[in-house]
Image (tube, grey):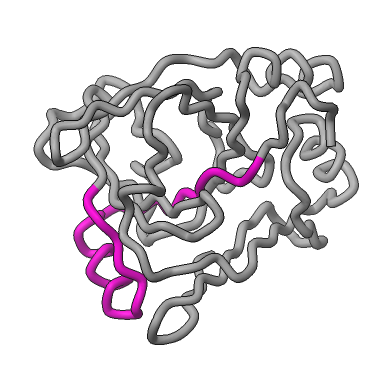
C-alpha cells in the first residue's frame, strides 16, 4: 500500500458491463442477485442498476440507455463491443483523489486526471463524484480511482441482500500487475497468472452464489 495520503483506500464498486441492461438485470434477479435502478449518465449513452455488496461496496451493472440519443463518443467500459455481460473493471474509493493521483504518479503509474461526474437517482437526488478515467481496454485489472465527497454513497440506497464473497484477478504479468496495484493504493487482491487480463467475483445471495466473470 502507499502511505496515509490515500486515507485507507477501499474497494468501492465492481463494474459489470452489458449490451442489454434490462436483460442482464432480469437474468441476475433470476439467479438471486437483485439490483435496484441507478440512473442515467447523460451524454454517455448509459444507465445503470446497483446492488449493495456489503462493507461499503456495490455492484454497478451498466449498459446502453435507449432513452438517450446515440453518444458522440464510444460508451465507457467497452460496452459498444460487448455481446454478453462481462466483469470489466473495478474502482477504489479514496478520500483525496488528487493526492491519490499524485501518489500513484510518484510510483510510476499514471491513473489520469480526475474529472467531475454527476447523475440523478430515480428519486431525483443528485449524486456528484470525481473519478479518474475508466479503462479504455477491458477488462482492466488495475482499478480506477473515485471520490464521493459529500454525496451519499450509492451502496446506501442500492438493493440489499447480496454480499461479496471473493474477488480475484488474472494477468499474464502478475508481478508487474501487483506493482501497479500497489502504486494506486489498491486493497489486496489475488492476481493469478493467466493468458489475458480477467476479473472474477463470487457474490453470495439468499438463493446461492452468483459468479461474475
Q: Position of residue 176 (x, y in %)?
A: 87, 41
Q: Residue furthest right?
A: 175
Is 136 displayed left or right of 126 in the figure?
A: right
- Residue, x 66% and y 23% (percent of image)? 111
- Residue, x 74% and y 13% (percent of image)? 102
The foreground one among 169 and 127 is 127
How many badges with numbers are in the image?
A: 0
Q: Within the magenta stretch, is there residue 35?
A: yes
Is 3 displayed left or right of 70 in the figure?
A: right
Is 162 displayed left or right of 174 in the figure?
A: left
The foreground one among 144 and 76 is 144
- Residue, x 58% and y 35% (percent of image)? 93
* Quadrant of res 69: top left
Q: Assign the C terminus to one quadrant of the image.
A: bottom right
- Residue, x 78% and y 59% (percent of image)? 190
Q: Residue furthest bottom?
A: 207
Is 16 displayed left or right of 139 in the figure?
A: left
* Quadrant of res 94: top right
Q: Position of residue 193 (x, y in %)?
A: 82, 61
Q: Assign the N terminus to one quadrant of the image.
A: top right
The foreground one among 171 and 207 is 207
Q: Position of residue 99 (x, y in %)?
A: 70, 14
Q: Which residues are magenta?
A: 10-37
**Relative to residue 135, is residue 163 depicted above or below?**
below
Q: Within the magenta stretch, is there residue 185?
A: no
Amino acid at each position: 500500500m502507499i502511505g496515509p495520503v490515500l486515507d485507507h483506500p477501499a474497494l468501492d464498486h465492481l463494474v459489470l458491463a452489458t449490451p442489454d441492461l434490462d436483460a442482464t438485470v432480469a437474468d441476475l434477479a433470476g439467479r438471486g442477485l437483485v439490483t435496484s435502478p441507478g440512473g442515467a449518465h447523460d451524454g454517455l449513452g448509459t444507465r445503470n442498476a446497483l446492488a449493495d455488496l456489503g462493507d461499503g461496496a456495490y455492484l454497478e451493472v451498466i449498459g446502453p440507455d435507449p432513452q438517450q440519443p446515440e453518444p458522440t463518443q464510444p460508451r465507457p467500459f467497452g460496452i459498444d463491443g460487448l455481446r454478453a455481460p462481462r466483469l470489466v473493471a473495478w474502482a477504489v474509493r479514496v478520500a483525496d483523489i488528487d493526492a491519490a493521483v499524485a501518489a500513484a504518479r510518484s510510483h510510476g503509474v499514471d491513473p489520469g486526471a480526475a474529472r467531475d461526474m454527476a447523475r440523478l437517482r430515480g428519486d431525483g437526488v443528485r449524486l456528484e463524484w470525481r473519478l479518474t478515467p475508466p479503462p479504455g481496454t477491458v477488462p482492466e485489472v488495475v482499478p480506477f480511482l473515485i471520490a464521493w465527497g459529500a454525496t451519499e454513497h450509492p451502496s446506501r440506497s442500492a438493493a440489499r441482500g447480496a454480499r461479496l464473497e471473493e474477488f480475484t484477478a488474472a494477468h499474464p504479468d502478475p508481478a508487474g500487475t501487483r506493482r501497479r496495484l500497489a502504486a494506486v493504493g489498491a486493497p489486496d487482491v489475488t492476481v493469478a497468472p493467466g493468458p489475458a487480463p480477467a476479473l472474477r467475483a463470487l457474490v453470495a445471495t439468499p438463493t446461492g452464489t452468483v459468479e461474475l466473470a
